[in-house]
Image: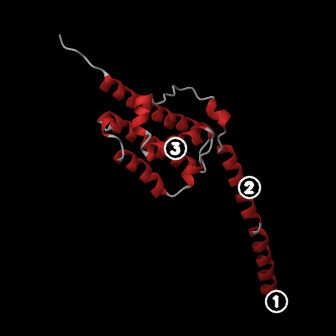
Amino acid sequence: MRTILLTLVGCFILLSSCKDAPEQANTDNVEASESQSLTEQDLAKLKYTDYILDEEAEKLIKNSGEYVQLEDLVKNIKQGDLSFFETSEETQKDLFKNLRQTLPDALNTESVLARILVLETKFHQLESLYNLSTTTKDELLKNTKEFLVAFSNLNLQMNKKMEFDNRTIEKP
């Protein structure tokens, strides 16, 4: 009789303590996601030089759908929308792979390809930090800035390439 009573009391304690744990974990996840969320105002405070494509480079690259998709991604990130990182990993890999493959011949140089590789690396770093629950807002802001700077450097390099190609030097 005593064993049955102790077993029932033990089961009651076990069941009553199990109900509280999931609720507490759920509130921890909500607090973590709120502390990670970036706003457009947070991103506007970042100090970096943002280069845009000049007209000649834009004419060449605008036919590439991958660059347009990348440009849209950067615009969304500048608005604090990091939902692209929740899409399938294949979509993310294909973006940079196809960007390198569809790059116009005039811009297909080692320097531009190196900037694309740096941009891809920064993209994956930002994605991994975004998906971690222990990431702080400052870390996320820092890596977002690095990604935006890498995109700006890609645009700068394409502008330099177009400027160099348009330069005509007459020999005496």
Above or below, 84 against 80 in this view is: below
- Which is closer to the viewer, label 1 or label 3? 3
Q: Is residue 67 visible?
A: yes
- Looking at the picture, tell me which residue is in the foreground, 32 or 159: 159
Relative side of 134 to 92, left or right = right
- Looking at the picture, tell me which residue is in the foreground, 91 or 27: 91
**Mark 2 / mark 1, whichever is N-terminal:** 1
Label 2: which residue?
A: 27
**The residue tagged with tag 3: helix, strand or loop?**
helix
Q: Where is residue 79 in the image (x, y as percent from the top left)?
A: 63, 39
Quadrant assignment for the C terminus = top left
Q: Where is residue 41 in the image (x, y as percent from the top left)?
A: 67, 33
**Mark 3 / mark 2, whichever is N-terminal:** 2
| Residue ranking furthest to the top | 172
Mark 2 neighbour class, 10 Å CA radius: few under 14, some 14 to 19, many 20 or more: few
| Residue ranking furthest to the left | 172
**The residue tagged with tag 1: helix, strand or loop?**
loop
Label 1: which residue?
A: 1
Q: How far apart are marks 3 and 2 (CA)?
A: 25 Å
Above or below, 15 against 20 in this view is: below
Above or below, 24 against 139 in this view is: below
The residue shown at (71%, 58%) is 26
Q: Position of residue 37 (x, y in %)?
A: 66, 44
Label 3: which residue?
A: 126
Question: What amino acid is found at the position of numbered circle 3 in the picture?
Answer: Leu
Using the image, tell me which numbered label, if any, was put on residue 86: none
| Residue ranking furthest to the bottom | 1
Mark 1 neighbour class, 10 Å CA radius: few under 14, some 14 to 19, many 20 or more: few
Relative side of 48 to 21, left or right = left
Q: Where is residue 131 in the image (x, y as percent from the top left)?
A: 56, 51
Question: What amino acid is found at the position of numbered circle 2 in the picture?
Answer: Thr
**The residue tagged with tag 2: helix, strand or loop?**
helix
